[in-house]
């Protein structure tokens, strides 16, 4: 019996050691990949108004500066530097093929700074005093923007909000691209978050922590009902410790990265 218990304990230790070894290997791999540079961005759309004819509520019309529109949206783009590197003079382009971009609001998050248009874009949009924008300039302005970010530190994000109108009945489509050597830009769809961590990631890490906790309880506690109760209680909040663990790993990664 003692030999069997010792064997099980050795197996548990091997599982725990293997789990931590796997996490360490994954972290080191991610650190090497991040040296290449990874940016990510998300886009959310909120409809402000829509032109419609309804037999009950009557006629509803939306306009912008006196010009009638089929719909109006506020589209918010957030881009984050997920790598372990800081970058200078990052050129970011926003573009669309089926949406009319109108006014904008930009910000470098956690700072008072806004995004400036690139010099190339400023030249395209330049209008002499006393003149009006050409049709080509309006087409460019309504279809794309280009900004330059002097410094984008690791973990830092930018936010761009456009007042826009979709040219079709579907939601707007606005994308980002960047011109920076060695950096890959990834689009991330909307995700539910827990204290700033994607819910799926928090759940996965929470399960790993739960397995370690369950093994520890099995080794230290002899009463099965205590183990079962502890496992059930942890299962109700597993995502929360997972989220905190990810945030802690991010802090450690940033500290090691300098």
Image (cartoon, helix red, strand yellow):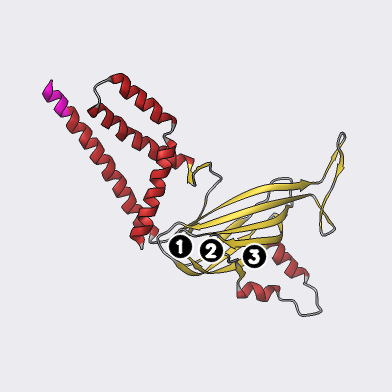
Q: Residue at x 69, y 52 (%)?
A: 74
| Location of residue 31 by image quarter | bottom left
Give SS at disc 2: strand
Q: Which residue is mark 2?
A: 178
Q: Residues within 10 Å of mark 1 (few under 14, many from 20)?
A: some
As drawn, the label of residue 183 is: 1
Tell which circle, 1 or 2, labels the residue nearer the N-terminal end.
2
Q: Residue at x 58, y 66 (%)?
A: 113
Vertical order, 32 against 140 (above or below)? above
State which quarter of the image contains the C terminus: bottom left
Vertical order, 21 against 92 (above or below)? above
In-image side of 24 versus 34 (left or right)? left
Real-space CA distance between mark 1 and mark 3, rounded to the nearest whole angstrom: 20 Å
Query: Which span of residues is magenta-colored?
Result: 1-7
Q: Are marks 1 and 3 in contact (CB under 8 Å)?
A: no
Q: Are marks 1 and 2 in contact (CB under 8 Å)?
A: yes
Q: Position of residue 169 (x, y in %)?
A: 74, 45
Q: Is residue 227 magenta?
A: no
Give SS at disc 3: strand
In-image side of 107 versus 130 (left or right)? left
Tell which circle, 2 or 3, labels the residue nearer the N-terminal end.
3
């Amino acid at each position: 019996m003692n030999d069997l218990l010792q064997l099980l304990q050795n197996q548990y230790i091997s599982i725990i050691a293997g789990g931590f070894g796997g996490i360490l290997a994954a972290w080191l791999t991610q650190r090497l990949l991040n040296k290449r540079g990874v940016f990510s961005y998300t886009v959310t759309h909120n409809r402000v108004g829509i032109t419609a004819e309804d037999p009950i509520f009557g006629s509803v019309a939306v306009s912008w500066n006196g010009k009638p529109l089929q719909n109006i949206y506020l589209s918010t783009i957030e881009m984050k530097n997920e790598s372990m590197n800081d970058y200078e003079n990052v050129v970011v382009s926003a573009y669309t093929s089926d949406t009319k971009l109108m006014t904008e609001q930009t910000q470098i998050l956690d700072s008072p700074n806004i995004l400036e248009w690139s010099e190339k874009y400023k030249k395209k949009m330049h209008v002499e005093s006393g003149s009006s924008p050409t049709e080509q300039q309006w087409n460019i302005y309504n279809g794309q923007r280009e900004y330059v970010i002097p410094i984008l530190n690791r973990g830092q994000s930018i936010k761009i909000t456009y007042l826009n109108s979709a040219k079709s009945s579907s939601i707007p489509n606005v994308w980002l691209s960047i011109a920076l050597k060695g950096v890959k830009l990834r689009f991330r769809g909307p995700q539910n978050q827990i204290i700033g961590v994607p819910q799926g990631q928090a759940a996965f890490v929470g399960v790993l922590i739960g397995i370690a906790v369950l093994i520890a309880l099995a080794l230290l506690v002899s009463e099965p009902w205590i183990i079962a109760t502890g496992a059930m209680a942890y299962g109700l909040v597993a995502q929360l410790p997972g989220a905190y663990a990810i945030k802690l790993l991010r802090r450690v990664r940033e500290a090691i990265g300098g």
